[in-house]
Amino acid sequence: MENKCLSCGVSENIIPLIQPAFDGGQKFICPQCLPSLIHAPRKIADKLPVLKDVKPATHKYE
Ligand SMILES: [Zn+2]
């Protein structure tokens, strides 16, 4: 079976996908969409509803 990015739908045959530890390993995300998962999880909550209550990660550089 061909795996696809949960956010944009790109195929694993086009770009290597990353597999988050979630939902028994049934979900995949591409490197281009990974920043959204980190910084804007609500933006992709329509594709993965569990993200609707996840706060964006913040960074501390100092
Ligand atoms: Zn993607």
Image (tube, grey):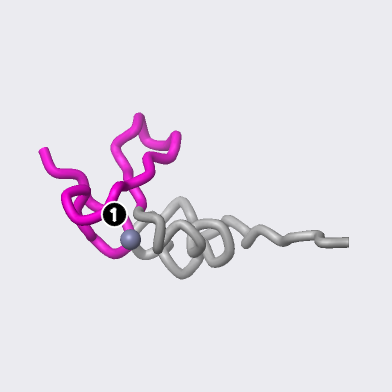
Query: Which x, y percent locates residue 33?
Result: 41, 62
In the picture, measured across the screen, residue 25 lies left or right of residue 20, that is left
Image quarter of the C terminus: bottom right
Mark 1 Cβ inside 8 Å of ligand 1: yes
| Residue farthest top in this picture | 24
Residue under the point 31% across and 54% down: 6
For the residue pair 26 and 15, the one nearer the viewer reads as 15
| Residue at disc 1, secondary structure | loop
Q: Which quarter of the picture shows residue 32? A: bottom left
In the picture, measured across the screen, residue 62 lies left or right of residue 28, that is right
Query: Which x, y percent locates residue 36?
Result: 49, 64
Query: Which x, y percent locates residue 17?
Result: 32, 47
Residue under the point 43% across and 40% down: 20
Segment tinted magenta in the rendering? 1-29
| Residue farthest bottom in this picture | 43
| Residue farthest left in this picture | 1
Residue at numbered disc 1: 5
Query: Which x, y percent locates residue 61?
Result: 82, 61
In the picture, measured across the screen, residue 12 lies left or right of residue 52, that is left
Image quarter of the N terminus: top left
In the picture, measured across the screen, residue 3 lies left or right of residue 26, that is left
Secondary structure that dominates the magenta span: loop
Residue under the point 46% across and 51% down: 50
Is residue 26 inside the magenta stretch?
Answer: yes
The number of discs equals: 1
Image quarter for ligand 1 equals bottom left
Kind of residue at disc 1: Cys
Residue under the point 44% across and 34% down: 21
Instruction: Please tell me how crowded label 1 is: few (under 14), some (14-19), or many (20+) other residues with Cα within 10 Å.
Output: many
